[in-house]
Amino acid sequence: MLEDVVIGGLRLATPPQENEYLCYFLHRWLDFRIPDVESAAELAGCGSELAWSLPYGGNYQSPFWYVHLPSAEAAEQVAKRTLMARGFFEVWGEGETWEELEESISSFPEDRKEPFLREHVTYKIMVDMYGKKCPQEEKIKIMDRLDFVPMQGKANIKTPDVTFWLLVSDASNPGLPSDIPYRMYFCREVAMSDRSIVQDFALSKRGFLGPTSMDAEMAFHMCNQAQVKKGSFTFDPFLGTGSVLIAAAHHGAYTMGTDIDYKLIRYGKLDASGGKHNIWSNFAEYGLKSPLGVVICDVNRLPFRGNAEEIFDALICDPPYGVRAGARKLSKRDIEITDRDSHISKTEIYSVGECCRDLLDLAAKMLKIGGRLVYFVPTTPETASVDGVPQHPMMEVRYSSIQILNSKYSRRLVTMKKILKYDFNLVEQYHQKQGAPKMAVDGIHGTIFTSRKEETFPPRKRIERRPVRRQAISLNTDLISTRAPTPNVSLCGRGWIAMFSQQLLGRAARLRNLRFLG
């Protein structure tokens, strides 16, 4: 039975377990790393058995964490889905010096080393340094230092039976956390992640994009946290150009979306050759199944029937919050519709607080029990402690990860799980207790884009320009002693070209006359 303790929402194994693997994280989106691996473990069916051990030195930003998983097969399943971990390794030894490393490797159980050191087992050694580039010459020297590992098989670079890694943590370079200690890990590769989908689905290769199209890597990460899998039903109420649903469809999910932008959904855009691009062409480009439905509507007034409940397995979205695109909702004072084919409804501002309230209500009603809501909400240094994470009586918060965008604002990825069946009366009582749906971050546009009148600029320096000294250009020739008159033009730009051309034409004419006379 796995004994564990939860500290700050992180499940830690105490003491370290036998089936522990070194999880080598990417050094990016630090708040997203652990939620990504845990979500992948839940998809693999081993989430309840996963537990962490703090990295050496106790620094949260370290890329080397120990994770307990039930088996090597479970680690392989997690690696197939995770995007934030480079791979999982069985550590044979670790230390700050070569002597410590050798002693640690020699103390590792022989019965776990022997099957991979036999004579018929081919191997390959890889060297990777965190925080430092390692030239090939240095890698070769490091490999030679590993002669104390009794490998009896032959080296095979292309198709080895087993791959050994020497992972080195060296955070001495500027810009990296200086309190991550130097350490070497000698490991056997158990499973490596496949990040090829990040390049395969890159926005630069996509035909239909908008100013707020979700980055492909982030879209897949959101699908991981939402537990999207084959056969699940995924809904995006702020569809845009369909980036999130494309990632969900890649994992075999059925998809559906809504958006208030009539022109975006109805017409798409034309390329230089006149070809039409839209949401459906994006899905066709990757050979994915088109959404089951795309509806032009407002999240504030969704067209679902009143008795429709618990339809979706996952609800994933990136609501507009007024930075690159402002959130809008249908105006209550819309004009009478005379032509449905050409009518575009009037809209009004949709505050972040009201948008979050409607989104959580939608998820609480339309998600199945255990379904997940994954969405972004903006935050600033001034409002982070005031707003916190939006709450709902039917939902519980699983993860809250901050992505820093610049010095003025960030965005928080919130993952919530539905735990109770929707109760209209309970929700109404909760909203009445909370009051008006306002958030401190509602004025984020004014926080980021300060008006020029409020900004102070240093006085501009007066630049003294020196007068340009113009020199006449003459064409000397032994045949002609006189110069043709030149037009009165400025010696710059087209005027200079006109003067030079006039002189050349005059010279050519005189040469022809001289030849004729001769």
Image (cartoon, rainbow, N blue to C red):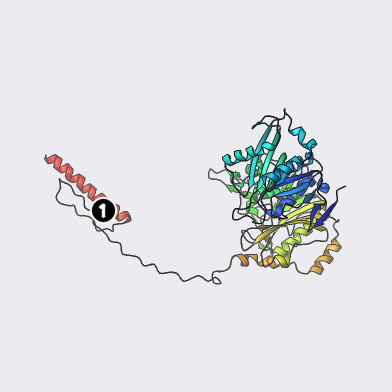
| Classed neighbour count for the residue bearing mark 1: other residues with Cα under 10 Å, few (<14), some (14–19), many (≥20) | some
Count the labels in the image. Answer: 1
Q: Which residue is at a point 73% across and 43% down the rendered structure image?
A: 103
Q: Which residue is mark 1?
A: 499
Q: Which residue is at a point 74% across and 54% down the rendered structure image?
A: 374
Provide residue 444's location: percent of width, then percent of height: 65, 65
Provide residue 211's location: percent of width, then percent of height: 60, 54
Considering only vertical position in the picture, is 35 above or below 142? below
Q: Nearer the viewer, residue 39 or 186?
A: 186
Can residue 332 be seen at all in this image of the molecule? no
The quadrant the C terminus occupies is top left
Considering only vertical position in the picture, is 44 above or below 425? above
Can residue 173 be seen at all in this image of the molecule? yes
Give the residue at the far left of this rendering: 518
Provide residue 396's location: percent of width, then percent of height: 81, 57
Provide residue 482's location: percent of width, then percent of height: 15, 51
